[in-house]
Image (cartoon, rainbow, N blue to C red):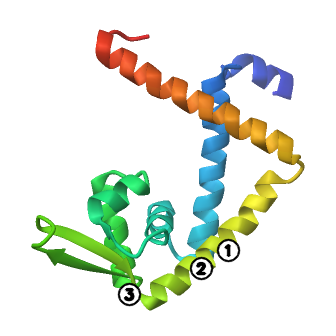
Amino acid sequence: MKETEDSETIPLLFDHGVLFRITGVANRLNRSAAVFYRDMFGIGLPEWRMMLALGKTAELKVGDAARSADLDTAQASRALKLLKARDLVTMEMTASRGRATIVRLTDSGRAFHAQVLAAGERRAEHIRAGFTPEELEQLFALLGRVGENAEALIELQRQTGQEL
């Protein structure tokens, strides 16, 4: 079968909407990052996100780390278990903070964080290639507005109980 016949008989699963395009780019970026961090550092995206969150502060409660990494509690728990097994984090139950579990990077975790951060910056340079600073500023502003509109839509759906 010729390529033109294939394209006529196989339904295309896309449109030209904003959601499709953003989701498509996000999926490609996630797949690329997953392969990169797995091959280079032996971690998945949840562990990568958790390392970034933990690298911003000396210690975090597990729930705060999960929110900062934009992970649900099950993902965060699995990620922390793997990071702890690699001696990259410590986890300490504390009664003084309402039985919260406090997570901290170990010395090797801080060194690992620095390596992951530097590698991520090199990847980001490739992703930003060809954009002027003005274009990047505009892109970030537009993505911020899309995010705000999505949050407003969630709130509207909660208030009205209707699908939009």
Reading the chain from its start, which is encountered first: label 3 or label 1? 3
Residue 13 in sight in this render:
no
> Which amino acid type corresponds to the residue marked 1 in the rendered image?
Ala
Say which quadrant the C terminus sits in.
top left
Residue at image x 45%, y 67%? 47
Residue 133 left/right relative to 88: right
Pointer 2: what residue? 114
Residue 87 disc label: 3
Residue 118 disc label: 1
Say which quadrant the N terminus sits in.
top right
Q: Position of residue 133 (x, y in %)?
A: 84, 47
Reading the chain from its start, which is encountered first: label 2 or label 3? 3
| Secondary structure category for the residue under label 3 | loop
Residue at image x 76%, y 17%? 8
Check if mark 1's residue and mark 2's residue have beta carbons within 8 Å.
yes
Is the residue 114 above or below the residue 12 in the image? below
